[in-house]
Image (cartoon, helix red, strand yellow):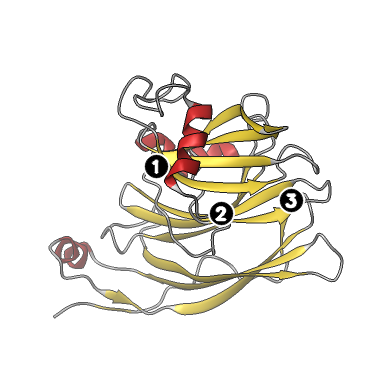
Amino acid sequence: MKSSLILVVFCGVGWSQLIPSDAVETSWPEKQTFLQVICPGTECSPCPPETSLAGQSDFRLRTIIFGHFLAAGSEDALAGGSGCEGHANGYSGAYLLTKDRSLWLKVWYNPRQNLDDCKKLTGSDGRDRLVCAASDMHFGVADSFLYLVDPGLDPDRQPDTWDLFFTVDDSLGGCVKMPDGTTVTGEIESISFAPEPQPPAVRITANARLGKAQISDKILSACEQGAKPSIATVSRRYEFLFDGKKILPDPKNPPIDPPTTSYQAVK
């Protein structure tokens, strides 16, 4: 799935902390240096003109990831933060900066991008990509998902900078049914990365716990009042290969949709 779907799934995005972040610890003076590059003279208060909330609130710098995003030999930085985007863009955005001699220069801004839960993977062209984990809530259905993003692609010229490659749904938390009439529960429990024998390929493994049941409207009504039922779940393992450019799912992966099982109502 490509970025045309991201506009939907990023509503209410959150940070899952499933992936050990490649963000670096920076001091307040270092953050001020980046803020002065992004918003000269204002430290990004109010929000800069390229953001959705331009002239309102302020850009709160949360995360900086250094890497080679524009070229194999470039010195770049992604500065991600919140405060200048609304619900539809997941409250997040990131600036790409590049170093020219001793100076940092602003390249472009990418709304919807949060960097709190991302790992760098070096591509076959020597440029870095990011594999990120996030979650959202949309009409009572929570999604936990993984996606590949190429920060070195201009978001204005190349709309498909995101590749959403794994999603787990949970409608039990919102006490609602899915379109097929079932209620599902799902959680990504862990994510791991292992280099393949042939660089730059990397094996990505996601372990998830999934369940699905036919739950009556009466039980779901009680669920909304706090009497949340439990659904029997199964543990499944999914593998993906980053081949240096894109993410390829293992053809032996089990289905995302689990079989319909039993549920236990709260008495």
Residue shown at the point (21%, 70%) measured from the top left = 228
Mark nearest the camera among 2 and 1 is 2
Q: Which residue is mark 1?
A: 11
Q: Secondary structure at mark 3?
A: loop
Rendered image: mark on residue 246: 3
Give the amino acid type for the residue marked by disc 3 in the picture: Lys
Give the amino acid type for the residue marked by disc 1 in the picture: Cys
Compared to residue 231, the image places residue 198 above or below, namely above
Query: Where the C terminus falls, by quadrant?
Result: bottom left
Residue 82, percent from left and from top: 39, 39
Label whose residue precedes the other's in the sequence (2 or 3): 2
Residue 206 is left or right of residue 158, and the answer is left
Residue 257, percent from left and from top: 51, 66
Residue 211, percent from left and from top: 42, 72
Q: Secondary structure at mark 2?
A: strand
Q: Secondary structure at mark 1?
A: loop
